[in-house]
Image (cartoon, rainbow, N blue to C red):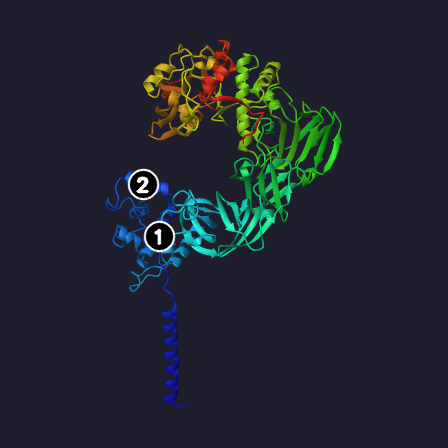
Amino acid sequence: MSRKSFIIRFGGIFALVFVLIGLILWLEPEQEGISRAQAAKAAALFQVSREECIQYSEEKGSSHFSDKEKNNWYVIYMDYLYDHGGMNLEYTESTARAAQQQLTYQEARLLAGFLGERYADRVNVNSSNRDEPYPANLWWSIYEEAASKESGPEVMEVILYGTPANVEGAESWTCYTSGGDFRFEGLALDQYLDQKILIFVRDGEMAGVGRLISEDVTYENVWVENVEDGELAVHAGSITRTFPLPDSEKNGENVLHNIVDLTLEKGRLTKITIKKDRITGKVLSVGEDYIEIEGYGQVPLAPAFRVYKVYGEYEEQSKSDILVGYDLQEFVAADGKLCAALIVRPFQADRIRVLLMDNNFQNITHSQVTVTLNCDAVMTYGEKEDKEETVKAGTQLTFTPEDEIFSGGRVVITPSSEEEGIRIDSLNRSQGTPVYGGSLEICLAENGLAVINDVLLEEYLKKVVPSEMPASYELEALKAQAVCARTYAYRQIMGNSYSQYGAHVDDSTNYQVYNNIATNSRTDQAVDETYGKILCYNGEPVEAYYYSTSCGHGTDGSVWGSDGSSTPYLQAVELRDQRGTRDLTSNEAFSEFIKNPDVPAYDSSFPMYRWTALYKGTTLGNQLGMSQIDSIQIEERGPGGVAKKLVITDVDGNTRTCQGQMDVRRTLGSSELEIERKDGTSVEGLSLLPSAFITVEEVGTARDGSKLFEIYGGGYGHGAGMSQNGAQGMAREGKTFEEILNFFYQGTDLEDKSLQGNG
């Protein structure tokens, strides 16, 4: 081949390549960009929540945008970024027009660096593209990587169930997905209906949609509510969706009121898979990925496990609503896993499951458990509790975590009598060796054995009331205590705090002290004469808080850190017939009040009504890891005068701030304190100061030169709800338990929950 021919042929090849490259570039669609407003929202939510952006804007009091434009949804995000290095006014104008325009390469680099320094280099900026729109898919690729590696928003794969465009009555800017309901202000979502998408969420606000995962999806474990006129109505998340029945389902009657999977192809329902296998049984425990059911053992949960309340008014609930110790639900199973729980009847509180703590009430597990049977019993064990033995009265059994009997699950000992059937020899309580009614369950737990007492609620209360109030108190006071204890227990059963162990409460002061003091005929009578009665407000059980002794004035529900609006029946009032309210929120007013031992109150005759304690500056300083204490100042008081904020300063200027009554009591509590009570007797200090109804005064100098501080206090406990000694004082004056309860829980009603469910 001649040199000329070679050059011509070689040049032709190059020309063809250049033509092909040009053709590819010409045919390739231009990548869609992303608006600055949407990118700004995503970037700001990478670090803070929407509420924090709003708070920042309010505290700043100004905006980079004009007054006319500052109320647009994106302003709070862009303002935050302007002030925190995510956006630059030199690159991005603070105008509505600029916000709606597309993000440029130059801006994307700065914004990517805001997610983390290393992400800035992922945006390839040069002189020719710096002002060109940055492709949305590249932005979301960087964002997804950063969110997965950094402490950014949650990355979720969800199916979009609905938006206000297709859900009647939906809240504005609220979308409904398989992962929950979220705000999506400023985002366009309708195009993704019935598709699986990757989203980013912080504190309930959707930061953006990363990408489409699939146009074909399966609605898993949804409840069929209705079939009518060729359409299927199902509950998907918190909304109802309707779909035309596929040709394979002519009338759909066989799917009604069942759990189903719906297969959708590009938004069209093509297949319905019915799940009809159901199992029932008492729930023994609820774990992270299983539910333990009596007779079935631990059954694993399907990934899309759902809980539906299907009696009365339908409601989708959560796993935490499955009550241990009860068989209120039917479980739908498929492929060896639980797909859904259908709660088919209301809860009636007749039993409670108590986790028994160790001898010092420090641990929930035991290294060894020894029991003696007071009557014949049946012991079941094995993976499905399918192994059974009869154990005779008088038999002593000892269990350790290493025993083979626990390899299949828990051991259940059911005496032939509900009353006093089991003595736990390895436990020691104030009364000595405790005896329990009901059944006993023992199972492996972390660091030992967990012991659960399944007992009738009324029998439980007979062992709570004497542990919480002296049996020598007036019967009407004991009856008020019984109602409070029952109400508290009722709420705790519904609360399911120990569901992973299969219990509702433990037997310590964490809940209500149980079986620490022996039963008594008077406290038994109080429980029997109030059988089933609980306190309700607007039909719901109240937070029946109680405490030992008041300072003459109670506080309200804000003592727990909220504004108190959720517990309107807990009010800050004087504990006397007039039931007035004093303004004790100033230090001067409260100091005058608390230093007066003669303020009249129902419980003013009790020793802890007033008390004092002397603190040495070096003692408190050593206790707190500070130098000698120079001052103790109460800077904020709540209703009734309870200390809400206390600041302790040492001689070096270091400070310790206490927020809330528990923090105040914990900080000032000390075994070295000697507390002198109103009657002149003294008690040694406690790990918690008796109450936060206190005032503190500097009263001199100790021998070591440190300051002395006198604490003037009143009452014992948090001060919200019923004063037990106040109830005793009222009962002495002839008040009934109904009058006592109405005084401490204003506006409540007594209801008999033994005759009805919680609906």
Residue 211: x %, y % from top left: 43, 55
- Nearer the observer: mark 2 or 1; the answer is 1
Query: In the visual, does 376 lie left or right of 269?
Result: right
Instruction: Tell me the kind of residue under disc 2.
Output: Tyr
Residue 684 at least partly seen: no
The part of the image, by quadrant, that contains residue 473 is top right
Q: Is mark 2 on a helix, strand or loop?
A: helix
| Residue at horizontal 55 percent and vertical 13 percent from the top | 475
Residue 657: x %, y % from top left: 37, 29
Instruction: Tell me the kind of residue under disc 1.
Output: Ala
The part of the image, by quadrant, that contains residue 122 is bottom left
Alpha-carbon distance for marks 2 and 1?
19 Å
Of 661 and 174, the residue lying toward us: 174
Q: Are marks 2 and 1 in contact (CB under 8 Å)?
A: no
In the depicted structure, whether residue 46 falls above or below residue 483: below
Q: Which mark is residue 123?
A: none
Q: Which residue in the structure is indicated by mark 1?
A: 39
| Residue at horizontal 55 percent and vertical 16 percent from the top | 479
Which of pointers 2 and 1 lies earlier in the amino acid sequence?
1
Mark 1 surroundings within 10 Å by alpha-carbon count, few (fewer than 14), some (14 through 19), many (20 or more): many
Give the residue furthest to the front.
229
Q: Which residue in the structure is indicated by mark 2?
A: 56
The part of the image, by quadrant, that contains residue 565 is top left
Of 582 and 357, the residue lying toward us: 582
Mark 2 surroundings within 10 Å by alpha-carbon count, few (fewer than 14), some (14 through 19), many (20 or more): some
